[in-house]
């Protein structure tokens, strides 16, 4: 083994590309591996197939320095790598709430037969507690190196849209290990971050696995808490936006993840909440996490609540009405539409007979692939042209800057529902709009469509 371990990154999704490019920028030799030959060619040509600020520059710098390359060959990965990072997806199973581990298993099975010398296989993907211990046996039984091919777990907490910064400067590093050798190697890999003072937690495998799902379940709980309070605000004619600022001012509560809105979506929070629950139930501790079922349903109720509000504002039904949906990504700063609350609402309204036109600054291509039956527009004005109702469903900063007077010039009626509390109700109402948001007191006028 050389002084500096040589790294491979298995799986080049959001997590894998970011990790590979960041590790190369830290001076490591990195080989990225993916079974998708087209993606590998694209990455070797310096193109990032996802929207992630700063990533393409880092990828190109790594390629130009000769430290970063991509391949489809697991044999090559086994040959060059001292530390193999597993970054493949662990989506929700189609037939239930637990995590689908088939990509991880396939990855271990593809790598193991070529592992002839001591190495570390580091899981970064989010997995249920107990997975690493099972994979360790699987790996050792299939690798010629036997138990010298060792598993450890190093969960990744990066947020989409902030992937580069979160990887280079994480707020903590967690490593679940079984040997001093594994700890030593991982301390080498993360030497820069450790030197910069990032807290480095060394744990057993199960604790490391749980650290990730528990963190995401807590974040989801915070969001669902404030969204449940928004419903009470609705009933009590109180203002949830003011209330959330008041709550967040208590340092024990904090402002982060207390923004009310259409709820959480994306490739992580929704499936992690469900997988955490499913695993706890398998372990006989399902009752302890029963509240997460409520967290999930409060979250999904925000989407149906938005549909009901749209129907109400549209005069009882959206059938035949033209609806402009602003936002398709699951959150601003991303082109990811996985489990996007905005697209879910757009799709339900379409199913109810509305003519839905969607705008998004980054996610239109992905949205079109997922929901080809919706209409898409390149600009906010084009999306809103002739609209009976405008819905703001993803809080892109550019939507907060929309001039209500200019938008009213193109819509059929000045009616807007702000699903993300991104607009100032006073400004929009003063400009003649009927502004609605759940948990924000309405205006006195009743100007529903008839
Ligand atoms: C999340 C975790 O933050 C990250 O640590 C983990 O590694 C992966 O999952 P990400 O999926 O990128 O990251 O999204 P995040 O920024 O956490 O937002 C999740 C969802 O919650 C989004 O749909 C967002 O719009 C919503 N959200 C977030 C709120 O509704 N209110 C808030 O206050 C914060």
Image (cartoon, grey):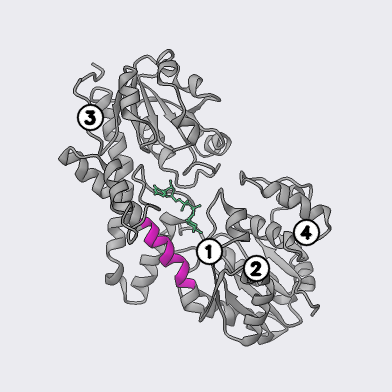
Percent across and percent down for residue 290 are: 27, 65
Query: For numbered disc 4, what is the local secondary structure?
Result: strand
> Which badge, 4 or 3, is on the more N-terminal residue?
4
Mark 1 surroundings: few (<14), some (14-19) or many (≥20) residues within 10 A? some
Identify the residue at horizontal 83%, vertical 52% (top origin). Answer: 64
Query: For numbered disc 1, what is the local secondary structure?
Result: loop
Identify the residue at horizontal 34%, vertical 23% (top origin). Answer: 428
Q: In this view, does 227 lie to the left or right of 93?
A: left
Label 3, label 2: how far apart the Cα atoms are: 52 Å
Q: Mark 2 points at which residue?
A: 85
Q: Give the range drawn in magenta.
A: 209-220
The question of residue 31 being in magenta is answered with no
Label 2, label 1: how far apart the Cα atoms are: 20 Å
Most foreground residue, 282 or 327:
327
Q: In this view, does 144 lie to the left or right of 412?
A: right
Give the residue at the far left of this rendering.
Answer: 236
> Which badge, 3 or 2, is on the more N-terminal residue?
2
Q: Name the residue under label 4.
A: 68
Quarter of the picture holding the N terminus: bottom right
Quarter of the picture holding the C terminus: top left
Q: Mark 3 points at which residue?
A: 442
Percent across and percent down for residue 86 are: 62, 67
Identify the residue at horizontal 33%, vertical 45% (top origin). Answer: 260
């Amino acid at each position: 083994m050389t002084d500096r371990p040589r790294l491979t990154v298995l799986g080049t999704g959001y997590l894998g590309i970011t990790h590979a490019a960041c590790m190369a920028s830290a001076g490591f030799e990195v080989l990225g591996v993916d079974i998708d030959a087209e993606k590998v060619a694209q990455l070797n040509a310096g193109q990032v197939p996802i929207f992630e600020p700063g990533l393409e520059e880092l990828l190109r710098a790594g390629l130009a320095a000769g430290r970063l390359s991509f391949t489809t060959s697991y044999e090559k990965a086994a040959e060059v790598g001292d530390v193999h990072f597993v970054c493949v997806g662990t989506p929700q199973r189609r037939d239930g709430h637990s995590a689908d581990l088939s990509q991880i298993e396939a990855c271990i099975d593809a790598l193991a037969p070529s592992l002839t010398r001591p190495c570390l296989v580091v899981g970064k993907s989010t997995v249920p507690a107990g997975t690493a211990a099972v994979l360790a046996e699987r790996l050792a039984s299939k690798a010629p190196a036997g138990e010298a091919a060792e598993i450890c777990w190093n969960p990744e907490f990066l947020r989409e849209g902030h992937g580069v910064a979160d990887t280079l400067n994480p707020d903590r590093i967690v490593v679940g290990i079984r040997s001093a050798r594994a700890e030593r190697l991982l301390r080498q890999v993360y030497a820069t971050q450790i030197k910069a003072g990032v807290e480095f937690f060394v744990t057993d495998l199960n604790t490391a696995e749980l650290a990730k799902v528990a963190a995401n379940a807590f974040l989801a709980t915070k969001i669902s808490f404030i969204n449940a309070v928004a419903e009470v605000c609705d009933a009590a004619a109180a203002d949830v936006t003011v209330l959330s600022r008041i709550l967040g001012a208590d340092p024990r509560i904090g402002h982060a993840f207390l923004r009310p809105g259409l709820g959480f979506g994306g490739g992580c929070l929704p499936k992690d909440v469900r997988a955490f629950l499913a695993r706890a139930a398998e372990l006989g501790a399902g009752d302890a996490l029963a509240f997460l079922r409520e967290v999930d349903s409060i979250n999904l109720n925000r989407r149906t609540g938005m549909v009901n509000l749209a129907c109400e504002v549209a005069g009882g039904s959206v059938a035949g009405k033209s609806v402009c949906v602003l936002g398709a990504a699951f959150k601003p700063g991303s082109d990811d539409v996985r489990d996007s609350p905005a697209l879910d609402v757009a799709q339900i309204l379409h199913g109810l007979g509305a003519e839905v036109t969607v705008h998004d600054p980054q996610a239109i291509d992905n949205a079109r692939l997922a929901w080809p039956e919706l209409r898409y527009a390149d600009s906010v004005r084009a999306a809103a042209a002739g609209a009976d109702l405008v819905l703001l469903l993803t809080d892109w900063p550019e939507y907060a800057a929309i001039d209500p007077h200019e938008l009213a010039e193109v819509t059929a009626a000045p009616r807007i529902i702000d699903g993300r509390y991104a607009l100032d109700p006073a400004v929009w109402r003063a400009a003649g709009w009927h502004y609605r948001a759940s948990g924000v007191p309405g205006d006195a006028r009743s100007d529903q469509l008839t």
